[in-house]
Image (cartoon, rainbow, N blue to C red):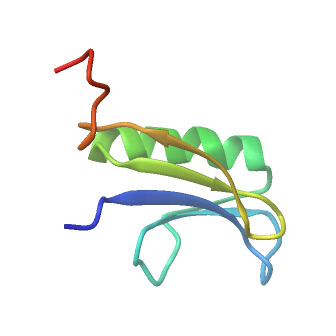
Amino acid sequence: MPRKSVHVIPNNNQGGWSVKKGGAQRASVHTETKSDAIKMGRVISQRSGSELIIHGKDGKIQRADSHGKDPCPPKDQK
């Protein structure tokens, strides 16, 4: 089963940054700054227990944070 995700991506049409759930057609949130988009994306990701994936202006993934149950936890944790 694919893991749920929330993406912070640049919005080339309107400028600024968008927060979209994985597979969604429309953005959940649009902000002027990347830092505001990350804050909003983190809230959405934490509420849904999903992965927050932050993209750069070029669209490449820069960072990812998990906010849910890890399907592959480290061996020293159960």
Residue at 79 percent across and 56 percent down: it is 32
User: Could you tell me residue 76's position as x and y percent?
Assistant: 27, 15
Note whether 23 is above or below 71 in the view shown. below
Q: Residue at x 60, y 38 (%)?
A: 39
Give left or right: position of 40 versus 44.
right
Q: Closer to the camera, 72 or 39?
A: 72
Residue 59 in the image, given as x and y percentages of width and height: 74, 70
Query: Quarter-wise, where is residue 17 in the image?
Result: bottom right
Foreground pick, 30 / 60:
60
Residue at figure coordinates x 55%, y 53% from the top left: 53
Q: Is residue 78 above or below residue 18?
A: above
Query: Vertical placement of 26 versus 58: above or below?
Result: below
Numbered circles on residues, count: 0
Q: Position of residue 42 (x, y in %)?
A: 50, 40
Q: Quadrant of the N terminus?
A: bottom left
Residue at 83 percent of width and 64 percent of height:
57
- Classify residue 38 as left or right of residue 25: right
* Quadrant of the drawing holding the C terminus: top left
